[in-house]
Image (spheres, helix red, strand yellow):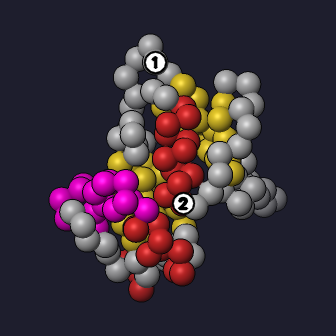
């Protein structure tokens, strides 16, 4: 029996949920939704939300979030990062500043959010074996 599962939402820990949600929404060209209990959602437009949850009593453990974005939106996202003074990188280790990658025939970049989560935008999905 085959069971299909689809991600519906995930919580993203932040020291300031509004600051972090607005940062990502701005970079991706999205909007921040209305608070839902302790969560502040960013709807990604594909049925998935990132629910920002404020956590101030302990350090935030950085995670990695990757977003498949339209090719035609990529340059605007890079421009919004530059306008905010946020350095983007071609690699996940952040050793190639102000550069993008061209993996799998697309374009991609990594950047830190306000809590140092390692965000990634890419225009082509990774080829999986």
Q: Is residue 13 visible?
A: no
Closer to the camera in the image, 118 or 99: 99
Closer to the camera in the image, 3 or 56: 56
Mark 2, Cα crowd under 10 Å, few <14 / some 14-19 / many 20+, is many
Give yes or no for residue 38 being in the magenta stretch: no
Give yes or no for residue 95 being in the magenta stretch: yes
Image marks 1 and 2: residues in contact by CB distance under 8 Å: no
Q: Which residue is drawn at 21% across and 63% down?
A: 97
In this picture, is 33 found above or below 103?
above
In the picture, measured across the screen, residue 104 lies left or right of residue 21, that is left
Figure quadrant of residue 88 = bottom left
Q: Residue at x 28, y 67 (%)?
A: 90
Q: Residue at x 67, y 24 (%)?
A: 38
Which residue, given by chain and number where applicable, does mark 1 sit on? Answer: 56
Figure quadrant of residue 9 = top right
* Secondary element at image label 2: helix
The secondary structure that dominates the magenta segment is loop
Q: Which residue is drawn at 49% across and 47% down?
A: 23
In this picture, is 71 found above or below 99?
below
Total labels drawn: 2
x, y percent for residue 110: 35, 60
Which residue, given by chain and number where applicable, does mark 2 sit on? Answer: 28
Q: Give the range drawn in magenta.
A: 80-96
x, y percent for residue 24: 51, 50
In the picture, measured across the screen, residue 52 lies left or right of residue 98, that is right
Q: Which tag, 1 or 2, sits closer to the chain's start?
A: 2
x, y percent for residue 26: 53, 54
């Amino acid at each position: 029996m085959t069971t299909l599962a689809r991600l519906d939402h995930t919580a993203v820990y932040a020291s300031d949920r509004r600051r972090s949600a607005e940062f990502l929404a701005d970079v991706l060209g999205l909007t921040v939704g209305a608070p839902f209990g302790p969560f502040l959602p960013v709807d990604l437009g594909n049925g998935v939300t990132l629910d920002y949850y404020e956590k101030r009593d302990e350090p935030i453990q950085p995670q990695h979030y990757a977003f498949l974005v339209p090719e035609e939106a990529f340059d605007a996202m890079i421009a919004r990062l530059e306008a905010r003074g946020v350095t983007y990188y071609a690699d996940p280790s952040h050793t190639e500043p102000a550069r993008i990658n061209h993996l799998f025939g697309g374009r991609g970049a990594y950047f830190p959010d306000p809590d140092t989560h390692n965000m990634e935008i890419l225009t082509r999905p990774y080829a999986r074996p």
